[in-house]
Image (cartoon, rainbow, N blue to C red):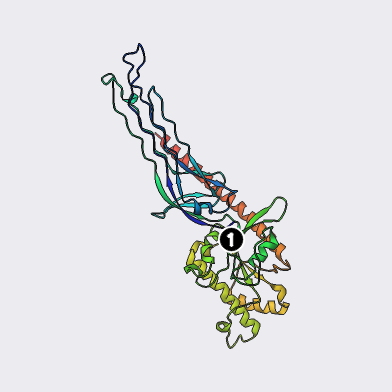
Amino acid sequence: MKFIDEAFVELHAGKGGNGVAAFRREKFIPKGGPSGGDGGKGGSIWAIADENVNTLIHFRYARIHRARNGEQGQGSDRYGAGAPDIELKMPVGTMVFDAETDDLLFDLSLHGERVLLAKGGDGGLGNLHFKSSTNRAPRQCTPGWPGESRRLRLELKLLADVGLLGLPNAGKSTLIAAASNARPKVADYPFTTLAPQLGVVETSLEKSFVMADIPGLIEGAAQGAGLGHQFLRHLQRTRLILHLVDMTGAGLDMSSSSTSEDDQPDNTMGLALARQVQLLSKELQSYDLALAEKPCWLVLNKIDMLTEAERQARWKAMKKKLAWKAPVFEISGLTREGVKPLMFAVQDWLTEQAKRDAVASATAVESNEDSLDVRKEVRQRP
């Protein structure tokens, strides 16, 4: 299935049915009075977050959704039937924006979450509502209210715990294939990943986390270069970013990294790799400052293609250039060397982070309860 993470839809809720002016006419009841019923309610349009839906592709081909109108009221106190509502299933993580103002309306982040996108019109009133002691034969009735019409933009941000970041051919797809049951396309040329891939990493029978692989970034991605800028939004919901670096430096331009004092090949390569890390960090800052501030670990990939001396020399030059303080891991996605320790470390970090979030949430609840108690005491004072 083709991955679609953005779509525009046009919604038209149903119009309410008209009320009617009718009078009761039966044998032996010469003055039965008004009996016009109300019109039925127009159909509304709802959105439901469904974890079984993974893409917005349906809304690329069905862009206009119309709910049915409510039925008109009838005589003999009969109300018109209401029209059925329309429920649109959307992936968990879908954000709903107003297409005209670009205001965020809803964020469907939980499975089963249900929100009203367009409200159906209420039915009109029949003349039985207008009878009174002075107006025993009213002929007034009201038309049904029109339903809401809206044009919305749907944007999908995948819900993943960990996101993989790196240049094309850094080995992201190989890593997610080695650590999970995901089977993305893997090849020896750039941009083999054309759409985000999700994989569930199981570290034990009770613990697991979701890892997302997005297409590789290049310089100028935040301004639209390459493919990665289309999918950077999927990193915004992640809690941890793994920045993969191809330690072989295949395809890197080392001319700007060579200096007179660091003229050794491995030192020059290490400086080029450090510049690569800085380049992608700047792209994240250009796209979203909050994204650039997320915890980020450095993962040195493809170590199976280097000797121990080459690895140490290149990392020494990188460390000097970057002044990196976050955790660093050396792995080989192909041979799976170092992959398990990395996944276990990620799981431990996520578990610890979840505990901290729970404590912070409990503290916030307690502070709110204390503030409510203080307000009650102030109100009860004479």
Residue 281 location in percent, x, y?
54, 69
Residue 127 location in percent, x, y?
32, 26
- Can you tell which quarter of the image residue 256 is in? bottom right
- Can you tell which quarter of the image residue 78 is in? top left
Q: Which image quadrant: the C terminus?
A: top left
Residue 132 location in percent, x, y?
29, 21
At x 56%, y 56%, the residue is: 158
Lateral position of residue 246 relative to residue 12, left or right: right
Count of residue discs: 1
At x 67%, y 60%, the residue is: 183
Q: Is residue 165 above or below residue 17?
A: below
The amino acid marked with disc number 1 is Pro
Q: Is residue 357 above or below residue 284?
A: above
Q: Residue furthest left?
A: 134
Q: Is residue 62 above or below residue 33?
A: below
Lateral position of residue 170 relative to residue 66, left or right: right
Which secondary structure, mark 1? loop
User: 92 and 268: which one is in front?
Assistant: 92
User: 180 and 268: which one is in front?
Assistant: 180
Q: Residues within 10 Å of mark 1 (few under 14, many from 20)?
A: many
User: 155 and 324: which one is in front?
Assistant: 155
User: 50 and 349: which one is in front?
Assistant: 50
Q: Which image quadrant: the N terminus?
A: bottom right
Q: Residue furthest front?
A: 27
Residue identified by numbered label 1: 196
Q: Is residue 47 above or below residue 304?
A: above
Residue 22 location in percent, x, y?
33, 24
Q: Residue furthest top?
A: 28
